[in-house]
Image (cartoon, rainbow, N blue to C red):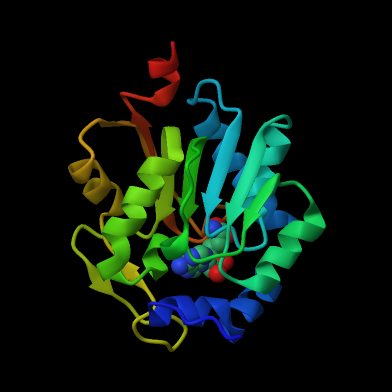
């Protein structure tokens, strides 16, 4: 039975465009650049034993994190079936949720909730729901890396309209959840001579009232 999605953006990523994206975005250089990024970010995080990525695609971020934190439990949420198959073939995650982030519910939480290059593709009306989901899934940190713009704008995405939106995602999350503290932020650049990556601005946010402290 064909799955009926709530938004045109989910249908787009679950379908042919998403399948082709998985074939295009491969390669060791992509993993190396991510290792460079996450080594800088993870050095600022304490006691990370679990990470969940929202919109993990074929798992390049999780592969990079695995090489830096070999004993950490990794989980992925991903709407595209072919991407999920890639992650399964890699075998580095303990849980894979082949579902839309908009349908994802769980009782558990992870030390880091990671989202990179995905909020920009979510229907803007659904962002508050995704922010809530990220906040709930995070036991300690939220790490997001997206295209930044101080005000919301839509831009063309490979000839498609209604599929790419830039805004201040981190600022919006911090306004909704005032207990979030900014640990650090930065920019990665496609013209970096050694570790190029699609341009994005990353933000590491920490829950000041995190479950790990409550447990103590
Ligand atoms: C631009 S890619 C980024 C992939 C990965 N985060 C990275 O940094 O390489 C966007 C990914 O998010 C997934 N995605 C988009 N909307 C989603 C949704 N509503 N639920 C789950 N996954 C989604 C897509 O299928 C795709 O794998």
For residue 105, above or below residue 198: above
Residue 195 visible, this angle? no
- Please give the name of the residue rendered at 58% of the width and 77% of the height, measured from the top-left corner: 18
Residue 111 position, x and y percent, is: 51, 32
Q: Position of residue 153 (x, y in %)?
A: 24, 71
Q: Nearer the viewer, residue 35 or 207?
A: 207
The quadrant of the image that shows the N terminus is bottom right
Side of 122 relative to 37 (left or right): left
Q: Closer to the camera, 60 or 108? A: 108
- What residue is shown at x 30% (from left), y 66% (from top)? 126
Residue 169: x and y in percent read 29, 54
Left or right of 28 in this view: 117: left
In this view, 113 is above or below 48: below
Image quadrant in which you'd find residue 85: bottom right
Q: Who's the residue at 72% across and 38% down the image?
A: 67
| Front residue of 102 and 18 | 102
Quarter residue 29 falls in: bottom right
Which quadrant of the figure contains the C terminus? top left
Q: Is residue 63 left or right of residue 185?
A: right
x and y percentages locating residue 152 in the rendered image: 21, 66
């Amino acid at each position: 039975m064909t799955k009926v999605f709530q938004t045109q953006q989910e249908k787009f990523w679950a379908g042919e465009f998403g399948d082709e994206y998985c074939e295009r975005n491969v390669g060791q250089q992509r993993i190396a650049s991510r290792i460079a990024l996450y080594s800088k970010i993870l050095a600022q995080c304490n006691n990370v034993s679990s990470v969940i990525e929202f919109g993990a695609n074929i798992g390049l971020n999780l592969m990079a994190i695995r090489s830096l934190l070999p004993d950490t439990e990794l989980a992925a949420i991903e709407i595209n079936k072919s991407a999920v198959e890639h992650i399964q073939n890699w075998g580095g995650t303990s849980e894979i949720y082949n579902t839309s982030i908009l349908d994802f519910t769980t009782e558990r939480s992870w030390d880091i909730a990671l989202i990179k290059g995905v909020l920009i593709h979510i229907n803007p009306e659904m962002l508050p729901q995704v922010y809530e989901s990220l906040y709930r899934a995070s036991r300690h940190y939220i790490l997001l890396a997206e295209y930044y713009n101080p005000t919301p704008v839509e831009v063309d995405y490979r000839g498609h309209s209604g599929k790419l939106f830039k805004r201040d995602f981190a600022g919006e999350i911090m306004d909704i959840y005032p207990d979030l503290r900014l640990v650090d932020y930065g920019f990665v650049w496609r013209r970096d001579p050694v570790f190029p990556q699609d341009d994005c601005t990353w933000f590491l946010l920490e829950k000041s009232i995190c479950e790990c402290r409550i447990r103590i």
